Image: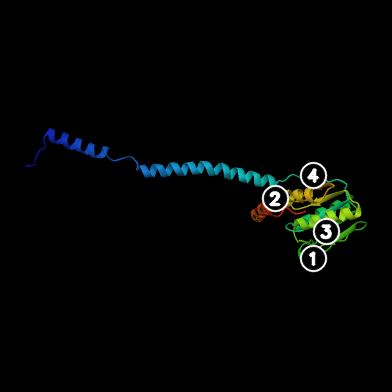
Amino acid sequence: MPLMSSDAEVEDDVSARGAVSSTRPAQPPRRRRSRRAALFALMLVVPLLAGFVAVSCALFVWPSADRPQHVGAVLSLAGSNENLREQRALALVREGYAPVLLFSEGHYAMVPCPRVPHVTVVCFIPQPARTVGEIDFAAKYAARHGLHSIMVVPAKTQATRARLLVGRCFKGHSVVVPAGAPPSIDLLPQVAYEWGALVKALVIDPGC
């Protein structure tokens, strides 16, 4: 014959279970603290990352650009997007914006020297073989030949640094007309390189 529990025993059993369950925390304090720390870190990192991306776009992806102007010489820089830069510089001198084209052949004359009818084309290998060497050559050439204005044709990612350097090295009037290019798969490495080069130009090696 089955044993019957009394009402008192049932109530005691329910009370005991309730007491046991009430002693268990809903969530361990350590886990709650780690979640709060992760949330705080996320709230801090996301705005910083968004700001960094915005600044990178303003400096290197969609930099400030000038309208073409009639100048004493056009300087075509060497580097990435070489075909676009060369085409842009050649188009500018063919359209009569300058009678002189200063054409950087980059490292060890790796880029062939172009020829343009009725335009003086000066091809050179910069020393040092960097953007500052190219702009320094243009500034010295302008000083020797009495040119008071130049138009620099860089890649878009290079435009901010080129504007900084031409402002340092050349005392006359300068404009920067980047060679436009849509975003490509190698945009991120170019932006990373330009960040390093810009910091170097600002802090380590001011040049000119």
- The front one of 43 and 129 is 129
Q: How many numbered circles are shown? A: 4
Point out the tag, 1 or 3, that comes first from the N-terminus.
3
Point out the tag, 3 or 4, that comes first from the N-terminus.
4
- C-alpha separation, residue under disc 2 versus residue under disc 3: 25 Å
Q: Mark 1 and mark 2 in contact (Cβ < 8 Å)?
A: no
In the structure shown, which secondary structural element does the residue marked by tag 3 occupy? Answer: strand
Asked if residue 64 is positioned above or below residue 117 in the image, the reply reads above
- The front one of 6 and 187 is 187
The three-letter amino acid code for the residue at tag 2 is Leu
Point out the tag, 2 or 1, that comes first from the N-terminus.
1
Point out the tag, 4 or 2, that comes first from the N-terminus.
4
The three-letter amino acid code for the residue at tag 4 is Asp
- Give x and y (percent) for residue 25: 31, 40
- Give x and y (percent) for residue 111: 79, 63
The three-letter amino acid code for the residue at tag 3 is Phe
Residue neighbourhood size for the residue with mark 1, other residues' Cα within 10 Å, grouped as few (<14), some (14–19), many (≥20): few
Q: Residue visible at 54% across and 44% down?
A: 45
Residue positioned most to the right? 118
Q: Is residue 116 left or right of residue 17?
A: right
- The front one of 179 and 109 is 109
Q: Which mark is residue 103?
A: 3
Quadrant hosting residue 125: bottom right
Q: Which mark is residue 202?
A: 2
Residue positioned most to the left? 1
The three-letter amino acid code for the residue at tag 1 is Ala
Residue annotated with mark 1: 109
- C-alpha separation, residue under disc 3 versus residue under disc 4: 20 Å
